[in-house]
Image (spheres, rainbow, N blue to C red):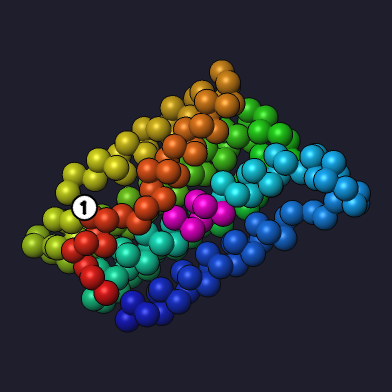
C-alpha cells in the first residue's frame, strides 16, 4: 500500500476531530462580552486541544514523510494513534464544561498519555519496518523528547488531584515542547 492513502485517511480523521472540537463550542445567549465569561474554561480547553491535534497532525506528517511503503503493522499502529486522538473532543468538552475539575482533567491527561504512547509505538513500528540502517532511527536517536513527555504526562495526571493548575501547566508545557515540528526528523528528510 502507498503511504498516500494512509496520509489522506489520517489527515481526514484529524480534520474531523478539529471540526468536532469547534462544534462543541456553544453560542452564548447573551449579546455582551460578559456573556462569554462562563465559556472561558470551555474555550481554554478547546484552544489547548486544537493545539495538541495540530501538533499531532504536523509531527505525523513529518513521520510519514520518512515512509516508503506501508505494511499492516503500520496501518494498525496508526489506527491505534487515531483511536486515542478521537477521544480528545470528548475529554476536552468534559474538562471544559466542568471547569477543569480533577477527574475530567485527569482523564484528559490519560488520553494525552495514551496518544503519546501510541505515537511512540507508531514511530518504533516505522523504524522497525525500515531495517537496521534506518535513517529515521538515526534522526530520532534515544527520543529523549518523547520519553520526557511521557513522564510529564504521568506527573500531570497524579498532580491533578493535588492542584489541577499544576496539571494544566504541565499539559501546556508538553505542548510547548512539541509545538515546533520535530526538527530531528524534519532536518534529515527535506521535502
In the visual, does 25 lie left or right of 184? right
Query: Residue 123's quadrant in the figure?
Result: bottom left
In the visual, does 170 lie left or right of 75? right
Q: Which residue is mark 1?
A: 140
Residue 32 vs 58, above or below: the answer is: above
Quadrant housing the C terminus: bottom left
**Furthest-front residue in this view:** 33
Does the magenta portion include 52? yes
Q: Residue at x 18, y 63 (%)?
A: 188
The residue lying toward the viewer, choosing from 173 and 94, is 173
- Disc count in the image? 1
In the visual, does 3 lie left or right of 36? left
Q: Residue at x 59, y 62 (%)?
A: 17
Quadrant housing the N terminus: bottom left
In the visual, does 47 lie left or right of 190? right
**Furthest-left residue in this view:** 133
Q: Secondary structure at mark 1?
A: helix
How far across and down, in percent of the image, does residue 14 sit?
52, 64
**Furthest-top residue in this view:** 162
Q: Residue at x 41, y 79 (%)?
A: 5
How far across and down, in percent of the image, does residue 153 sit?
44, 35
Q: Is residue 94 visible?
A: no
Q: Which residues are magenta?
A: 50-55
Q: Is residue 89 visible?
A: yes
Secondary structure predominantly adopted by residues drawn in magenta: helix
Q: Residue at x 46, y 69 (%)?
A: 10
Residue 107 vs 116, above or below: the answer is: above
Does the magenta portion include 130? no
The residue lying toward the viewer, choosing from 181 and 116, is 181
- Mark 1 residue crowding within 10 angstroms, few (<14) / some (14–19) / many (20+): some
How far across and down, in percent of the image, does residue 121 sit?
32, 52
Amino acid at each position: 500500500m502507498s503511504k498516500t492513502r494512509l496520509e489522506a485517511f489520517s489527515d481526514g480523521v484529524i480534520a474531523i476531530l478539529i471540526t468536532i472540537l469547534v462544534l462543541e463550542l456553544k453560542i452564548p445567549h447573551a449579546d455582551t462580552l460578559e456573556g462569554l465569561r462562563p465559556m472561558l474554561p470551555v474555550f481554554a480547553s478547546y484552544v489547548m486541544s486544537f493545539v495538541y491535534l495540530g501538533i499531532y497532525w504536523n509531527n505525523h506528517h513529518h513521520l510519514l514523510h520518512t515512509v516508503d511503503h506501508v505494511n499492516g503493522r503500520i496501518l494498525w499502529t496508526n489506527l491505534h494513534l487515531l483511536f486515542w486522538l478521537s477521544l480528545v473532543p470528548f475529554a476536552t468538552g468534559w474538562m471544559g464544561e466542568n471547569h477543569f475539575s480533577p477527574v475530567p482533567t485527569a482523564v484528559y491527561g490519560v488520553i494525552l498519555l495514551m496518544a503519546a504512547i501510541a505515537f511512540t509505538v507508531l514511530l518504533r513500528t516505522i523504524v522497525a519496518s525500515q531495517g537496521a540502517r534506518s535513517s529515521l532511527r538515526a534522526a530520532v536517536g534515544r527520543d529523549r523528547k518523547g520519553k520526557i513527555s511521557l513522564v510529564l504526562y504521568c506527573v500531570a495526571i497524579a498532580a491533578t488531584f493535588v492542584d489541577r493548575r499544576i496539571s494544566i501547566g504541565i499539559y501546556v508545557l508538553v505542548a510547548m515542547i512539541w509545538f515546533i515540528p520535530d526538527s530531528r526528523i524534519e532536518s534529515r528528510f527535506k521535502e
